Amino acid sequence: MKILVTGAAGFIGAHCSLRLLRDGHQVIGLDNFNDYYDPALKEARVRWVEAEAGAFTLQRLDLNDAVGMAELFASEQPEVVIHLAAQAGVRYSLENPRAYIDSNLSGFLNILEGCRHHPVQHLLYASSSSVYGANQHIPYRVEDAVDHPLSLYAATKKANEAMAHSYSHLFGIPASGLRFFTVYGPWGRPDMSPIQFARAIAEGRPLQLFNYGQHQRDFTYIDDIVESLVRLIPLAPQANPAWDREHPDPASSPAPWRLFNIGGQRPVELSDYVALLEKHLQRKAEVELLPLQPGDVLATCADVSTLEQVTGFTPQVSLDEGLGRFIAWFHQYYPRPDQDVARANGQAPVHQRRAV
């Protein structure tokens, strides 16, 4: 199939593109290579994908470029769209909220318009566990209400689900929203905790653990994310004939629209997470305990029963195993503790933010 992957130079997008190419699909990648973190890492991911699976078409284009996006859909006519590009990060949304409106709302509208005017067999788009917000029901179920987001990032992801539903209802676009839970693994983002924590431990710098290290996160290894996504591609949603307007199911619809959680189902307290990093790095961490940060949720845990029912698959890689694979990559990519990703590639220093 011809598949458009947005965010193809991103963490999930690169892994997804590699898997699709290996499976024999034609991948049209899209990425704007912005500087939220250093584009050198994104360039390195693309080189990795091409070294493993061969060259593929890559469009350097911003989602918010309405004309460019319309031309891309018209020229490429993708059969499937996997929309992974977005302005990521909960805390960064406190600093630069307009970036989230431009990418996550205006950019997503251009994706929907492309699918409207050039119909696709399936639109799969990244949502987030962040949409559950103030919901205290654990594990999170796709049937739960998500009416109280705690950050603008979460609000834009909730809006994406609503926008996709409206286009599914009006124009029959089969759309699946994928609520990812704390994705980690090789080639991850440098603003997230695995790289930030591993570098701090390796360099003997203190880790900042917010909420005094008592957060719980449902970590999900990247291969489990990709396997779930690939299995969903041929399973485009259909209208739910049993949908009851008097008792509406928030996860399905009389339109061809559906939601899925993709998570490891095993929430881990951050202090235990740090202990596993110490084990694989064979170094002790210096920890700085700090209060809860605005926008953070206390705990996440995915109910993936809908994913299992539809695909027959549930995420399988344990955090211990996944962190072992991550640290093996980390040692290769960061040859010395005082070097960052960019210096390892002979380029400018990486711009890093606090861990999420």
Image: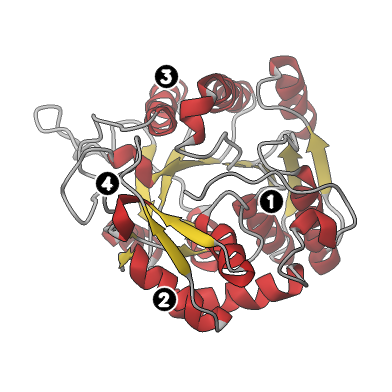
> For the point 77% across and 22% down, which residue is it?
71
At which x and y percent is residue 105? Answer: 51, 22
Q: Quick one: 319 or 309, which is closer to the camera? A: 319
Residue type (three-letter) at the residue carrying disc 2: Ala
Q: Is 145 positioned to the left or the right of 345 in the image?
A: left
How dense is the environment of label 4, judged by Cα within 10 Å: few (below 14), some, or many (20 and up)? many
Q: Is 79 positioned to the left or the right of 264 in the image?
A: right
Q: Is residue 17 above or below residue 162?
A: below
Tag 3 residue: 170
Tag 2 residue: 275
Residue type (three-letter) at the residue carrying disc 3: Leu
- Determine the CA span between mark 1 and mark 2: 43 Å
How dense is the environment of label 2, judged by Cα within 10 Å: few (below 14), some, or many (20 and up)? some
At which x and y percent is residue 76? Answer: 77, 34
Colour setting: secondary structure
Camera-near label (3 vs 2) is: 2
Indicate the secondary structure of the residue bearing disc 3: helix
Q: Quick one: 70 or 341, which is closer to the camera? A: 341
Q: Is residue 43 above or below residue 268?
A: above
**First in residue order: circle 1 vs circle 4:** 1
At which x and y percent is residue 62? Answer: 72, 27
At which x and y percent is residue 10? Answer: 66, 48
- Determine the CA span between mark 3 and mark 1: 25 Å
Q: Given the current orientation, which residue lies at the most extreme top position?
A: 67
Residue type (three-letter) at the residue carrying disc 1: Met
- Determine the CA span between mark 2 and mark 4: 31 Å
**First in residue order: circle 3 vs circle 1:** 1
Indicate the secondary structure of the residue bearing disc 2: helix
Tag 1 residue: 1
